[in-house]
Amino acid sequence: MSNIYGKGAKGRATKLHALITRSKGRCEKCGAGEQAFLQCAHIISRKYSWTRTDLDNAFCLCASCHRFFTDNPVEFGIFTIDKIGDDKFDELIEKRNCIDKFDWEEEADRLKVIAKEEGLI
Ligand SMILES: [Zn+2]
């Protein structure tokens, strides 16, 4: 079975983060519902550990809006600032730049608690 989320605790955390993000149940840009293939769209690239599974670092977007923003990063930036504001964006940038080791086991456990509380798992 292929796993798009990655291996081990990092993969578990990434999968839970996507599950929680998609549970918003509608596209945050166009309002489309679950039938529009909702996806977890990262604000800051998922390659950065410290923001990869931050629930403030992702929107729930339909596949179409996600593709549009991937192809149009300037529009995505404008949308992002409009949605979360400059202060929250600055916080994410600061967190992204952290160079300390990230504890994926702890993060997977944290997200599991949230997913359970929301009845997602
Ligand atoms: Zn959409």
Image: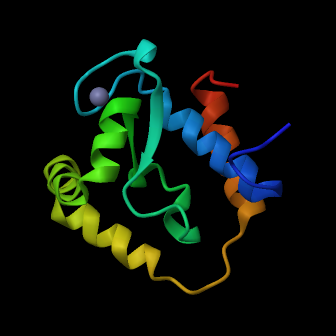
Left or right, 52 with reference to 64:
right
For this rendering, which residue is in front, 81 or 113?
81
| Picture quadrant of ligand 1 | top left
Left or right, 97 with reference to 28:
right
Asked whether residue 121 is in view, the answer is yes
Left or right, 76 with reference to 21:
left
Q: Position of residue 43 (x, y in %)?
A: 36, 56
Q: Which residue of the protein is positioned furthest toward the front in this rendering?
A: 71
31 w.r.t. 35: above or below: below
60 w.r.t. 70: above or below: above
Name the residue located 30 percent from the left edge and 35 percent from the top edge.
65
- When asked about the image quadrant of residue 26, the answer is top left
The quarter of the rendered structure image containing the C terminus is top right
Q: How many marks?
A: 0
Q: Position of residue 89 (x, y in %)?
A: 27, 64
104 w.r.t. 59: above or below: below
Give the colouring mode of the picture.
rainbow
99 w.r.t. 34: above or below: below
Q: Position of residue 60 (x, y in %)?
A: 39, 35
Left or right, 107 with reference to 37:
right
Q: Which residue of the protein is positioned furthest toward the bottom in this rendering?
A: 99
Name the residue located 44 percent from the left edge and 12 percent from the top edge.
35
Asked whether residue 109 is in view, the answer is no
Name the residue located 47 percent from the left edge and 23 percent from the top edge.
37
Q: Position of residue 7 (x, y in %)?
A: 80, 55
Name the residue located 18 percent from the left edge and 60 percent from the top edge.
74
The quarter of the rendered structure image containing the N terminus is top right
For this rendering, which residue is in front, 49 or 72?
72
